[in-house]
Image: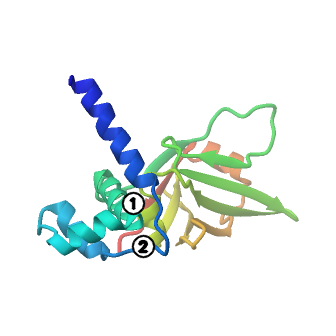
């Protein structure tokens, strides 16, 4: 068997295992046990290996923990730039260069609201939703646009803190922004 077909065979076996369902399945092993096995801190016992093989749900959890391990240990921040305006329309949103964050700018009755939203596909989304850290958004000059804690939906919101509307403000202050965790 050549290397390509061996890899394909391994992927097919993995797909079959992960797709299977078992009646009244539940997590059979704690995350701490699975993480210790993934890290090589301890081997699974025979009964733990049997539980893993009999519980597709536990096997999928092991796979998710494995995927999360490949993500950099700590997200340090995401940067974005104000893109060229089209047709003079009001600025209603900005997206970070990595596509992980959207800054929504909503005008209502002459006042602006800022909503920071985490993209579900962000590689660090599960970790941030679990930890719910305090975040801040800085404009290109380093002034705080928004600071707050993520909610369960991956959003954080506050009133626009500046006199100028968002479009002119960002243009006058470096045309960029940064989303970052607040050091504790």
Q: Earlier in the sequence, mark 2 or mark 1?
A: 1
The residue at which mark 1 appears reads as 60
The image position of residue 27, as x and y in percent, is: 39, 74
Which class describes the residues within 10 Å of circle 1: few (<14), some (14-19), or many (20+)? some
Which class describes the residues within 10 Å of circle 2: few (<14), some (14-19), or many (20+)? few
Residue 133 visible from this viewpoint: no
Q: Quadrant of the N terminus?
A: top left
**Residue appearing at x 70%, y 52% in the figure:** 166
Q: Quadrant of the C terminus?
A: bottom left
Which is closer to the viewer, label 2 or label 1?
Answer: 1
The image position of residue 40, as x and y in percent, is: 12, 62
The residue at which mark 2 appears reads as 131
Q: Residue furthest right?
A: 109
Q: Residue furthest front?
A: 23
Residue 73 against residue 6 in the figure, above or below: below
* Front position in the image: 44 or 42: 44
């Amino acid at each position: 068997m050549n290397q390509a077909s061996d890899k394909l065979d391994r992927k097919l076996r993995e797909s079959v295992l992960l797709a299977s369902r078992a009646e009244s399945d539940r997590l059979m092993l704690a995350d701490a046990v699975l993480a210790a096995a993934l890290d090589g801190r301890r081997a699974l016992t025979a009964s733990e290996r049997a539980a893993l093989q009999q519980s597709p749900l536990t096997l999928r959890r092991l796979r998710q923990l494995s995927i999360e391990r490949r993500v950099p240990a700590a997200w340090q921040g995401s940067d974005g730039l104000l893109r060229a305006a089209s047709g003079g329309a009001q600025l209603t949103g900005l997206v970070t260069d990595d596509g992980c964050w959207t800054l929504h700018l909503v005008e209502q009755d002459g006042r602006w609201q800022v909503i920071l939203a985490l993209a579900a596909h962000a590689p660090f989304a599960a970790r941030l939703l679990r930890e719910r850290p305090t975040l801040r958004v800085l404009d290109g000059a380093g002034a705080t646009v928004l600071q707050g804690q993520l909610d369960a939906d991956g959003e954080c919101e506050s009133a626009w803190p500046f006199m100028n509307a968002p479009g002119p403000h960002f243009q006058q202050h470096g045309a960029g922004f940064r989303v970052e965790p607040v050091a504790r």
